[in-house]
Image (cartoon, helix red, strand yellow):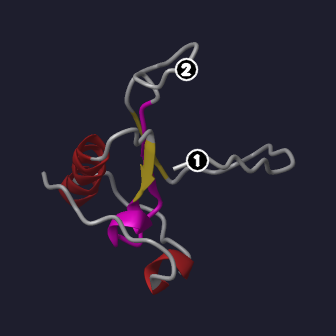
Amino acid sequence: MAVRTVLRLPAPQLKMVAEPVARLDQPAQQVADDLVDTMGAYDHCVGLAAPQIGVGLRVFAMDVGGHPKASSCHGLVVLFNPEVLVGTEPKVHMRAV
């Protein structure tokens, strides 16, 4: 388990298509653990994808439990090979820094 560096645009890894996870084995578990550890190291981080820590796999972790706008929560969730099946028009939210 490790806290990894979070990549930001224009990092080329963020523009590549992530590969599906073939097996839920120890390397896949390590990616999940690193995502959770890295999320925990950043204040107000509610979700992180494997490509954001330099891993080209389809893995995503999220936990909105501590977010003030969350009305319900299932706790920490790690998704392997997630797919968006239904979508709506994108909404952009800008936060003042």
Q: Establish if 3 lies above or below 9.
A: above
Answer whether residue 52 is magenta in the image.
yes
Mark 2 nearby-residue class (10 Å; few <14, some 14–19, many ≥20): few
> Dots 1 and 2: beta carbons under 8 Å?
no
Pinpoint residue 29: horizontal percent, then vertical percent.
24, 50
Q: Is 49 on the left-hand or right-hand side of 86?
A: left
Q: Which image quadrant for residue 87?
A: top right
Q: Distance between the Cα atoms at labels 1 and 2?
A: 19 Å
Q: Secondary structure at mark 1?
A: loop
Answer whether residue 3 is magenta in the image.
no
First in sequence, mark 1 or 2: give its number. 2
Q: Nearer the viewer, residue 78 or 44?
A: 44
Q: Establish if 97 lies above or below 40.
A: below
Residue at image location 41% in from the left, 72% down from the top: 56
Amino acid type shown at disc 1 = Ala
Residue at image location 47% in from the left, 60% down from the top: 58
Q: Residue 70 — which label?
A: 2
- Identify the residue position indicated by label 1 in the image: 96
Q: Which residues are magenta?
A: 50-63
Q: Residue furthest front?
A: 97
Residue at image location 58% in from the left, 47% down from the top: 96
Q: Is 91 on the left-hand or right-hand side of 31?
A: right
Q: Residue furthest right?
A: 89
Q: Residue furthest top?
A: 71
Pinpoint residue 24: horizontal percent, then vertical percent.
32, 51
Q: Secondary structure at mark 2?
A: loop
Q: Residue 29 — which label?
A: none
Q: Nearer the viewer, residue 91 or 77?
A: 91
Pinpoint residue 14: horizontal percent, then vertical percent.
50, 75
Mark 1 vs mark 2: in front:
1
Q: Establish if 12 lies above or below 81.
A: below
Amino acid type shown at disc 2 = Ala
